[in-house]
């Protein structure tokens, strides 16, 4: 026969009142981005290709996540879905707790314009316009007055260390400088999420690490959520979390306990092109 459990002490008086008045533990914050059982099929019938297979993923605000995997693993498809450039065939995508299924194309465009910034391997700058005018472009689409556009674009160029080159065209800028302009254009709207698809793919090793140091500092200083696709382990090492796709599924998802912390670099000057 088991012995009876000892009686538990009963709180009385002030202790009981204090325990009753203590606030309940705060609920865990909901993720900024959440995929629930998301699948994506391209084509139909015998030609159908299942690019994503029941992907579950949660991303908190302010995280810097590197998405990796071999060609055909589904990482680029996942990035397109996360950036609202494509829609899932099945499953649920929630942004800020709101399900996005069923949104029309113009509604997704409005969502991208309001909350997302994009950086690609190619810089996609307008060749005959200055760095300042390239950065202003998203604000033109928002209908902001010229004075506000100029001020915001100058602030964004200053954030990426390119104020001295504001009136230079892309042909007068190095590859690293052009990618900085592209980053300034992505952040000029003050998005919550920056999606970077192979942002160093067209750069040499030194410029690649300079760009990654910049993206990392923007994430830390602004609380910017960064989602980055890359093939390169040394580039992914700047992120605080590594998600690897294989055959349309998340094969691993782990924190990076020791992200690369670059050494501080001197301020940029017109004579020291980056």
Image (tube, grey):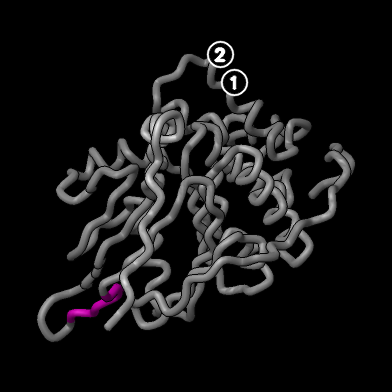
Judge the density around disc 1: few (<14), some (14-19), many (≥20) Cα neighbours within 10 Å: some
Quarter placement of the N terminus? bottom left
Tell me the quarter of the picture where residue 25 sits. Answer: top left
Judge the density around disc 2: few (<14), some (14-19), many (≥20) Cα neighbours within 10 Å: few
User: Residue at horizontal 29%, vertical 75%?
Assistant: 51
> How many numbered marks, from 0 up?
2
Asked which secondary structure carries label 1, the reply is helix
Task: Identify the magenta region.
Answer: 48-53
Asked which secondary structure carries label 2, the reply is helix
Q: Where is mark 2, residue-wise?
A: 147
Q: Position of residue 137 (x, y in %)?
A: 49, 32
Asked if the residues shown at circle 1 and circle 2 are in contact, with their CB atoms under 8 angstroms apart, the answer is yes
Going by the image, does 176 lie left or right of 185?
A: right
Q: Position of residue 136 (x, y in %)?
A: 54, 29
Report if residue 156 lies within the magenta region. no
- Main secondary structure found in the magenta portion: strand
User: Residue at horizontal 53%, vertical 52%?
Assistant: 63
Residue farthest to the bottom? 46
Going by the image, does 10 lie left or right of 172?
A: left
Q: Where is mark 1, residue-wise?
A: 150
Q: Does residue 32 appear in the picture of this structure?
A: no
In the image, residue 9 above or below residue 112: below
Going by the image, does 61 lie left or right of 147?
A: left
């Amino acid at each position: 026969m088991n012995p009876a459990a000892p009686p538990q002490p009963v709180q009385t008086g002030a202790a009981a009142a204090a325990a009753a008045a203590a606030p309940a533990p705060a609920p865990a914050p909901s993720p900024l981005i959440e995929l629930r059982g998301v699948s994506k099929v391209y084509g139909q019938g015998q030609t159908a290709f299942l690019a994503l297979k029941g992907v579950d993923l949660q991303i908190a605000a302010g995280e810097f996540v590197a998405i990796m995997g071999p060609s055909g693993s589904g990482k680029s498809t996942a990035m397109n879905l996360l950036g609202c450039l494509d829609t899932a065939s099945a499953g649920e995508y929630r942004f800020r707790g709101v399900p996005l299924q069923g949104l029309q194309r113009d509604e997704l465009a409005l969502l991208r314009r309001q909350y997302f910034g994009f950086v690609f391997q190619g810089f996609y700058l307008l060749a005959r316009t200055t760095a300042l005018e390239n950065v202003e472009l998203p604000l033109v689409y928002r209908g902001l007055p010229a004075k506000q556009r100029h001020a915001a674009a100058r602030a964004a160029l200053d954030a990426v260390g390119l104020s001295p080159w504001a009136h230079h065209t892309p042909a007068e800028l190095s590859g690293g400088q052009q990618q900085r302009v592209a980053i300034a254009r992505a952040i000029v709207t003050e998005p919550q999420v920056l999606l970077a698809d192979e942002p160093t793919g067209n750069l040499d090793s030194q410029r690649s690490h300079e760009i990654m140091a910049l993206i990392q500092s923007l994430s830390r200083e602004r609380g910017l959520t960064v989602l980055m696709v890359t093939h390169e382990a040394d580039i992914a090492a700047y992120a605080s979390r590594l998600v690897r796709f294989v055959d349309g599924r998340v094969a691993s998802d782990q924190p990076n306990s020791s992200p690369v912390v670059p050494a501080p670099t001197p301020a940029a000057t017109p004579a020291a092109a980056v």
